[in-house]
Image (tube, rainbow, N blue to C red):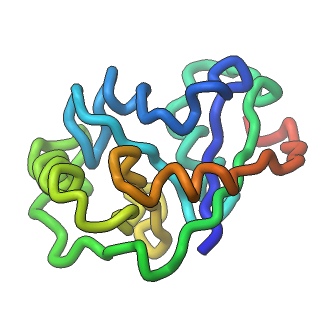
């Protein structure tokens, strides 16, 4: 499966480290837990970034990365925890993600997007034994966004 990640060019060297998620936490991980958030399409990856932009921050600083991950290395989270899509987020989704991260049972966890619930994000575990191999396949994808998005 091809997955997509968008990061700022200045953070390109650490884009696959999970450091941002470790420092700030996310819907599916607590602060202190490394995780790499990806999307199953470029358009969803863009929406996931846009929803967090403040003011009119330039999109020119962002790069799109594509990574290839074996389908059989992914696990769907089911059933979803109660209030997984609550805004602001609740600890239930973080606890589910933390338990998955600790288990090292799969390279990726497939979860619905809160923004577009019929589409999916994939959390990658940088501590999983298959992560380094997949990371080696990562490549930058050329993309120019229409400035009308902002």
Point out the image quarter for the N terminus. bottom right
* Along the line of sight, the residue nearer the viewer: 15 or 119: 15
Q: Position of residue 73 (x, y in %)?
A: 41, 73
Front residue (pair 48, 23)? 23
Occupied quadrant, residue 61? top right
Residue 6 percent across, percent down from the top left: 64, 41
| Depicted 107 relative to depicted 71: above or below | above
Query: Going by the image, does 137 lie left or right of 40?
Result: right
Q: Nearer the viewer, residue 146 or 137?
A: 137
Q: Position of residue 131 (x, y in %)?
A: 47, 53
Q: 46 above or below 119?
A: above
The residue at 43%/81% (across/down) is: 72
Q: Please state the horizontal and vertical placement of residue 36, each as a whole percent of the image.
A: 44, 44
Which residue is located at x 71 percent, y 47 percent? 65
Q: Quadrant of the C terminus?
A: top right
Drawn side of residue 25 relative to residue 8, left or right? left
Front-lying residue, 53 or 28: 28
Q: Seen in the image, is 129 located left or right of residue 31?
A: right
Q: Which residue corresponds to the image point at 75% horizontal and 37% vertical from the top-left?
A: 63
The residue lying at 42 percent from left, 35 percent from top is 18
- Labels in figure, total: 0
């Amino acid at each position: 499966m091809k997955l997509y990640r968008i990061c700022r060019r200045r953070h390109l060297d650490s884009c696959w480290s999970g450091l941002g998620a470790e420092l700030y936490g996310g819907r599916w991980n607590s602060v202190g837990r490394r995780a790499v958030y990806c999307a199953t399409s470029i358009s969803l990856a863009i929406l996931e970034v846009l929803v967090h932009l403040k003011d009119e921050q330039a999109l020119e600083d962002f790069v799109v990365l594509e990574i290839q991950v074996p389908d059989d290395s992914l696990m769907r989270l089911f059933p979803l925890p109660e209030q997984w899509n609550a805004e602001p987020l609740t600890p239930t989704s973080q606890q589910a993600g933390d338990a998955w991260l600790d288990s090292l049972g799969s390279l990726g966890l497939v979860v619905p997007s809160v923004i577009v619930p019929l589409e999916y994000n994939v959390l990658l575990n940088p501590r999983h034994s298959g992560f380094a191999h997949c990371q080696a396949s990562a490549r930058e994808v050329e993309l120019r966004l229409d400035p009308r998005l902002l």
